[in-house]
Image (cartoon, rainbow, N blue to C red):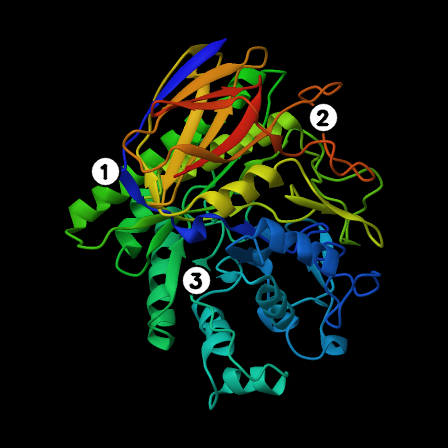
Amino acid sequence: MRTARLALDPAFTVGPVPRRLFGSFVEHMGRCVYTGIFEPDHPSADEDGLRTDVLELTKEIGPTVVRYPGGNFVSGFEWEDSVGPRENRPRRIDRAWRSVETNQFGLAEFDSWARKVGTETMMAVNLGTRGLQEACDLLEYSNLDSGTKFADLRKAHGSKDPFDIKLWCLGNELDGPWQTGHKTAAEYGRLAAETGMAMRSIDPDIELVAVGSSSRSMPTFGDWEQTVLELSYHAVDYVSLHAYYQEHDGDAASFLASAVDMDLFIDQVVATADAVRAKGKHTKKINLSFDEWNVWYQSRPHHAPGVQPWDVAPRVIEDEYSITDAVVVGTLLNSLLRHADRVHIGAQAQLVNVIGLLRSEPGGEAWKQTIAHPFEQVRRLATGDVLQVVTTSDKYETAKFDAVDVVDASATYDEEFLTVFLANRDQEQPASVEVPLRAFDVDRVATAKVLAATEGQDRHTTNLEGDHSAVGLRALEDVTVTDGLATVVLPPLSWAVVQFRKG
């Protein structure tokens, strides 16, 4: 039996739980949009062509903000193609994923979908092939009421009320050579500052996200953030981070410790942003938008067999997620919570089919992947303040990170509920975790759920078409409370949530 003990107290908090932390991402990539959220011929389609089965599952997992329309796609996107009568919208090539974009789903359709889901839109502008003017035109189209060229054009297209989008990404991954319109940090920083200030002159209430590094492994990491922020600090509110994790060559131990890398990535970007703040004598803080994160097996072929260049909505990176992947995602959510004082926005990438929380089949079923379960539970149950948690845990050795805690944890408290999110990274042994409750006004278990292998399963078990519930949450029975101390026993390789309240 592995052991761990948490130290936590309601007087020691990280900060309020940022509701935008539990976001997702819809990109015009593969089948995320077409046969994902939008399929007019599907039996469940509503009057707008939206798949209501996917819509209902999306409501259940409940992303609080959704980034749109990319991603790499946005760096070649001409937003004017996606508005107005559908029969007049052009078909365009998408250089990013070498497919054809029909533009049958566009800005108004996404706004309608987002309102039905009950989520906030995080809009990205094209600073790859386009620039300041086009970004301002899109903002005018989206947010102004009437009496100007693009506001009146939106009305003429049938959208009487403004979309009122307040959160905007100034481009995407422009540090990456793969990106259409790839730029140096100096080129991008100046463009971001100019574009941001021009957009604010149209709508002073918007919030702006500057492009940060596409990963911590980028050769320009650190220098990119410093240069970009030195040029654009006055114009932006956030800097972005992107990170994807996968298991390499069967090294599950290192893969399960992926949150160690996420913790370090966040800490380093915060340090860089604060150094620029000090150097520039700025008063405001730049916070972080971790607006692409997930498990993604980039070593696998991106395209399914038979996919040809310039197909419409091809099958692209449709990873099927296992129990192991779900545990890792649970630890990544812990990392985001642990940094809630500075990471105010998160966007799991992506929502459906493309490395998705959800999967769907054309004309067929839709279901939750394993990774959707920790996402949904943290979004639902992380309330109030994030607590500072000091974990004293048995260690295990990894090839990538040396010795790592067996138990990974985060916690929140809202005066009614103390909620603890736990992961046991040990693949063979259970872990006993002690949680002191005396400082909190709670003394009984309200909820205890766990995701782990059941009889006949192993760590590679997934949820597939026709067997949607092979991996899910079940009651965690081994939780006891005695004299102000809770003991939680986690199965091997598991993720769990335990919520305590006053009896």
Amino acid found under the numbered disc labelled 2: Thr
Label 1–label 3 contact, CB within 8 A: no
N-term mark: 1 or 2: 1
Q: Which residue is mark 1?
A: 11
Q: Which residue is mark 3?
A: 167
Q: Which tag is nearer the camera, tag 1 or tag 3?
A: 1
Residue 397: tell me if it is visible: no
Amino acid found under the numbered disc labelled 3: Leu
Which percent across, then down, holds residue 218?
45, 34
Q: Is residue 252 above or below residue 15?
A: above
Amino acid found under the numbered disc labelled 1: Ala
**Label 1 to label 2: alpha-carbon separation:** 41 Å
Residue 118: tell me if it is visible: yes
Q: Few, some or many C-alpha atoms within 10 Å of disc 2 (few <14, some 14-19, many ≥20)?
A: many
**Foreground residue among 179 and 39:** 39
N-term mark: 1 or 3: 1
Question: Which residue is at the far left?
Answer: 281
Q: Which residue is mark 2?
A: 461
Quadrant into which the C terminus falls: top left
Residue at left offset 68%, top offset 56%? 56
Residue at left offset 43%, top offset 33%? 444
